[in-house]
Image (cartoon, rainbow, N blue to C red):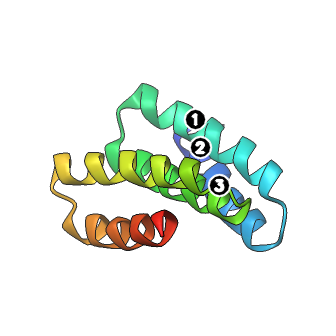
Amino acid sequence: MDLELLALVRLNLAESLLHDGDPERAQDLASAALGHYGTTQNYWRRIECLRIMGDIARHQGQHANAANFFDNALRLAEQIGAEREAIALRLRLASASG
């Protein structure tokens, strides 16, 4: 299987599992996808992975960890000029911090 496709499937499944109430499995899949996108330097997908991992941490009540994921995603979004993602991440960061 194509590794890029596999990583995307993992990322989509992670988001779905989070919404279905399985954050532990979602975390494993999102982390695996992040590893792939970090290796391939796909910054857009890394932002998605970090956002989902932040959502997972927030769902688990780990607000400081969630804020860390959102902050890392925000910095990356700002670095590549992804303004729409940056706006959404600022909102998530604000909700995770307070």
Amino acid at the residue labelled 1: Leu
Residue at 18%, 46% (x, y): give it: 79
Amino acid at the residue labelled 3: Ala
Residue 62 coordinates in the image, percent (x, y): 66, 54
Compared with 64, 85 (above or below) is: below
Residue at 81%, 50% (x, y): give it: 24
Few, some or many residues within 10 Å of mark 1 (<14, 14–19, 20+): few
Few, some or many residues within 10 Å of mark 2 (<14, 14–19, 20+): many
Disc 2 marks which residue?
A: 7
Few, some or many residues within 10 Å of mark 3 (<14, 14–19, 20+): many
Q: Secondary structure at mark 1?
A: helix
Residue 46 figure quarter: top left
Which residue is outermost to the front?
98
Residue at 43%, 55% (x, y): give it: 70
Disc 1 marks which residue?
A: 3
Discs 1, 2 touching: Cβ within 8 Å: yes
* In this view, the mark in front (1 or 2): 2
Closer-to-camera residue (81/74): 74
